[in-house]
Amino acid sequence: MSEESKAVARAFYDAMNSRDVDAILASYTNDARTWVLGEGPYAGFHPVSRELLGGFLKAGEIRFTILSMISEGDVVALEVESEGSMGGRPYSNRYHNLITLREGKVAELKEYFDTAKAGG
């Protein structure tokens, strides 16, 4: 299952990089949720929705690159890097994301990132 889980994680980031809300939503289970470290509108647990994704995509243009991945069963741990812009300013960051899958889709995404970079 680990290689299949990694393939699902890769496809999820491909969908995010495409900025196609329908493709991103298709990557998630119907009851998926995200959890983001820190403060701000995306912090904490949130159910995945068209509105949530639309707000994130309108806030900036970020491209994600997977640097490394480890998978066991339906859980994938990733080191990810971003480049792009947020709020009209250049933005880059590094993340550790933990994805839990169910039936070949993302059921939960937890995002840990460099909060110092997020503020400026």
Image (cartoon, grey):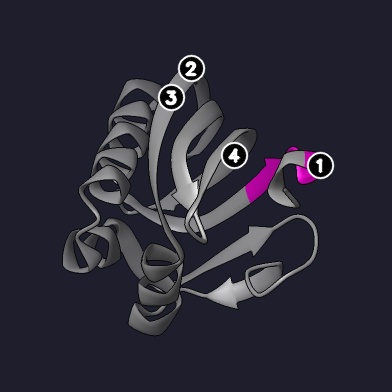
Label disc, if present, on residue 49 of the rendered structure: none
Residue carrying label 1: 116
Which of disc 1 and disc 2 is earlier in sequence?
A: 2
Point out the tag, 4 or 1, that comes first from the N-terminus. 4
Residue situated furthest front in the rendering: 88
| The image quarter in which residue 13 lies | top left
Along the line of sight, the residue nearer the viewer: 79 or 33:
79
Judging by the rendered image, the residue that carries numbered circle 2 is 67
Residue 48 versus residue 76 in the image, above or below: below
Quadrant including the N terminus: top left
Circle nearer the viewer, 4 or 1: 1
Q: Outermost residue, bottom direction?
A: 51
On the image, which quarter does residue 37 sit in?
A: bottom right
The crowd level at tag 2 (other Cα within 10 Å; few <14, some 14-19, many 20+) is: few
Q: CA distance from mark 2 to mark 3?
A: 4 Å
Q: Does the stretch in magenta take in 67?
A: no
Dots 2, 3 in contact, CB < 8 A: yes
Q: Which amino acid type is shown beneath numbered disc 3?
A: Ile
Nearer the observer, disc 2 or disc 1? 1
Nearer to me, 90 or 2: 90
Q: Quadrant of residue 11?
A: top left
> At numbered mark 4, what does the secondary structure look like: helix, strand or loop?
strand
Give the residue type at disc 2.
Leu
Which residue occupies 37% across, 64% down? Answer: 57
Circle 3: element type: strand
User: Circle 3 is placed at which residue position?
Assistant: 66
**Type of the residue with mark 4:** Asn
Q: Nearer the viewer, residue 51 or 83?
A: 83
Of the residues under marks 1 and 3, which one precedes in the sequence?
3
Residue 64: x %, y % from top left: 41, 35
CA distance for labels 4 and 1: 17 Å
